[in-house]
């Protein structure tokens, strides 16, 4: 044993460890600083953008249906004084030109028997002809949300501004609402098939152009 006293002091950490802890400390300080700025400006953004408020969107207007014939409206012109026959039957006198093909519905299922210029809902609530969509969506309720969102039907106007909705009876005949099936058109013809029909076209393709 030597006579020198023992050195109990711990050895100094390597320089790379000091650099690592220094970088970690700086990263923590940076994160805390950014978090404080984010909390100060708002929970959804780290920048204070000026707020903009959009003007309220105007209520859409409903396009009124154009009657195909004025002979049937107002209904009270003919049905005003005569008693109402509630018997379900095939019409042969005045409305024989109307093809009723709407499920099992009959005239007085939609038209009011007492106030002939009005429609009525299932609970006997009276509605105007201009609000016939309220009557239609009782049975076609799945189409109501699509129609209001613009998925079903047609609307015109602005994205955020005045717009006009087409109601059900603008496109559908209320007495026979199913559209007539359309015959498919032939497929498009290829340009070379069209060109080969004439003599100039045949010479053009035969020469290899």
Image (cartoon, rainbow, N blue to C red):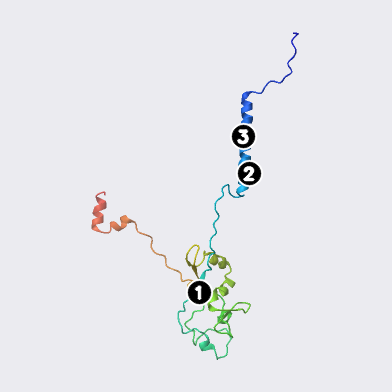
Q: Dot 1 lies on which element?
A: helix
The reply to whether discs 2 and 3 touch (Cβ–Cβ < 8 Å) is no
Q: Which mark is residue 36?
A: 2
Residue 101 picture location, percent across and down: 52, 76
Q: Earlier in the sequence, mark 3 or mark 1?
A: 3
Q: Quadrant of residue 110?
A: bottom right
Residue nearer the viewer, 185 or 153: 153
* Gap between marks 2 and 3 measured at Cα: 15 Å
Quadrant position of the N terminus in the picture: top right
Q: Nearer the viewer, mark 3 or mark 1?
A: 3
Q: Dot 2 lies on which element?
A: helix
Residue occupying the point 30% across, 58% down:
194
Residue under numbered circle 1: 169
* Gap between marks 3 and 1 measured at Cα: 70 Å
Residue 168 picture location, percent across and down: 51, 72
Residue 11 picture location, percent across and down: 69, 20
Q: Which mark is residue 58?
A: none
Residue under numbered circle 3: 26
Residue occupying the point 25% across, 51% down:
206
């Amino acid at each position: 044993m030597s006579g020198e006293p023992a050195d109990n002091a711990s050895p100094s950490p390597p320089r790379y460890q000091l650099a690592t802890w220094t970088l970690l400390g700086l990263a923590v300080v940076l994160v805390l600083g950014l978090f404080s700025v984010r909390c100060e400006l708002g929970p959804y953004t780290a920048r204070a953008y000026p707020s903009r408020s959009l003007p309220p969107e105007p209520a859409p207007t409903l396009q009124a249906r154009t009657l195909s014939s004025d002979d049937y409206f107002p209904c009270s012109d003919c049905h005003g004084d005569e008693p109402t026959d509630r018997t379900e039957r095939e019409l042969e006198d005045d409305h024989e030109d109307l093809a009723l093909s709407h499920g099992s519905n009959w005239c007085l299922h939609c038209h009011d028997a007492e106030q002939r210029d009005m429609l009525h809902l299932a609970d006997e609530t009276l509605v105007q002809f201009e609000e016939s969509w309220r009557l239609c969506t009782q049975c076609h309720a799945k189409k109501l949300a699509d129609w209001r969102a613009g998925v079903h039907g047609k609307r015109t106007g602005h994205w955020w501004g005045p717009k006009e909705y087409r109601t059900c009876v603008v496109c559908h005949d209320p007495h026979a609402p199913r559209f007539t099936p359309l015959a498919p058109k032939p497929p498009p013809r290829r340009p070379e098939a069209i060109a080969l029909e004439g003599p100039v076209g045949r010479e053009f393709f035969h020469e290899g152009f």
